[in-house]
Image (tube, coloured by chain):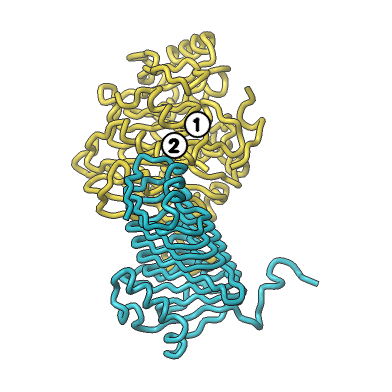
Chain colours: A yellow, B cyan
Amino acid sequence: MPREGEVRIPSGCAISGIFSRDRSLVNGSVIAKSISVMHERSNGLGGGFAGYGIYPQYKDHYAIHVFYDNLQSREETERFLDRHFDIINLSKIPTRPNPRIKDAPLIWRYFVTPLPHRLSDSHLDEDEYTARCMIRINNTIGGSFVFSCGKDMGVFKAVGYPEDVADFYRLEEYDGYAWTAHGRYPTNTPGWWGGAHPFALLDLSVVHNGEISSYDANRRAVEMYGYSCNLLTDTEVITYILDYLKRKQHLSLKECANVIASPFWSTIELKDDDEKERLSYLRKMFPSFLITGPFSILVGFNGGMMALNDRLKLRSLVAAEKGRKVYFASEEAAIRVIEPELDRIWAPRGGEPVIVTLDKEVRR
Amino acid sequence: MLEVDVKNMRQEDIAALIREADGEPLTLKSCMGQRYIGCGMKNVNLTLTGTPGNALGAYLDGGTIRVKGNAQDAVADTMNNGKMYIDGSAGDALGYAMRGGKIFIHGNAGYRAGVHMKAYGDIQPVIVIGGTAGSFLGEYLAGGTIIVLGLNREKEPITGFFCGNGMYSGRIYLRTDEKPVGLSEKLLMRKIDDEEKKSVIAPYIEEFSKEFREDYKKCMDGTFIVIEPNPKNSYKELYAAVS
């Protein structure tokens, strides 16, 4: 089967997200119901979910989700993991047969913690240590693909419609305080398991509707900082850019949004002096991370979620609130189906991020 | 009047229902994102509740569609004739390339409302938006009338960036005395007098206020500005020299 980058297929996508500010748990079946309303925005070539707060029993361990093409890639990866991490638990990720989910790879999950002496010898913090190890697996071990490696969160994705992917992964067996979902309609590529959304590095995950016209410029820039874009899918580069800006450059999420969806110079001109200086600084400091072309994205991370449109709002995005819950989706119907009565519903403006975080009392 | 709960129905089956009603009043309850409702139809009398999906009334060629709630994206794409009343807000790309008929939105419209709307002879499309409109309102407008009332807004501007960019015919009326941000030099903006208010926009605003039970006087109150292309500064050489 041809992989990403070898075939070009013309045309949408669907995204949906739920966030409980009070950390109240939402069952995985709820987000599956939401995304399934937008069935027609995808074409069965990719669906996926990211859940946060789903592994409370292992919340201090990195949850590594891996696709393997064969037993050999699994053995090699496990040897690598053994050398670098203390593996607390390992198992196949529970799935159930679904007639529309085909060609499944071997799907394994490991709860790990970096080996203390390796970590201290590396002079890295544990996030950077873990991220580098995961990038190394994806780069060097053929047939192995780590698609999720955060703490107390996990990505579940496959080739198929999102509702079938949810059924396949038995998503109703997970409860989380935040969920994102994606239904894929690949625009440039044939769609494979690794190319489904969400894309994640550590706890940061991205689901994306759109097509980045600045992909290659962004890729070249981010690869200078040790990342490796080996999925040839534009969303991957957004994940790494956000990881770089947020985790390594310590930018706030609003600043990250101002970099990747920077206002036009003509718009910056209209701002007051302080804002003009701030926005100009970010545009000049990180010009290679400006993302052009249409996009609406949901960014999940431990304790929060951000929704962002490109500055021209070339993809749809609706936000809504009900009590302490916040909803995002490509279409209003996908929110109404799980919460018919809303306190507030609105369409965020292009380039203006909506950022939600856990209430102070429930942060950990 | 026939009423059907369509929550779990597929769009094909909804279309069959509408065809079967053949112009008789039909209420479709609890719409849940089904697309293309009333698409290309000539003879419809629909009332919708819930949230109808994208491309509602696309290519509509006559009749009436009422929505008791919000509509999503691409409402009335290339609409040719008929009327649509949305008692809520509409998403992006409302009335894209609309050629005829009238659209009334009680609430807000998203980005790109009325892009490349056009008119011919006495076929003059009209969009009336009660709340605010997003950026690119009436971009490349080629004919027809867009009216934005900005009712019940607080600090937010009546429209966003790039209002009327590239328009070469038609008119955009805004109930405000403020110039839209960054209005193109290719466009003229003027305050309208009572005569123009009365003869041009009053009938549409009357229909709007009647349909949505808004106070007509409140809707007409205050200054209206109109944005029109500047005949002396046209777009003909915007992108390249034209010989």
**Residue B5 visible in the shown view:** yes
Q: Is residue A146 above or below residue A279?
A: above
Q: Residues within 10 Å of mark 2 (few under 14, many from 20)?
A: many
Three-letter code, disc 1: Gly
The alpha-carbon separation of the residues under discs 1 and 2 comes to 8 Å
| Residue nearest the viewer, comparing B219 with A8 | B219
Give the residue at x 37% y 69%.
B130
> Mark 2 = which residue?
A182
Image position, residue A115 (x, y; %): 38, 17
Q: Is residue A73 above or below residue A194?
A: above
> Mark 1 = which residue?
A46
Image position, residue A353 (x, y; %): 40, 52
Image position, residue A101 (x, y; %): 47, 22
Give the residue at x 46% y 36%.
A183
Provide the chain ID for the residue under circle 1: A
Image side of residue A226 versus residue B155, left or right? right
| Residue nearest the viewer, comparing A127 with B105 | B105
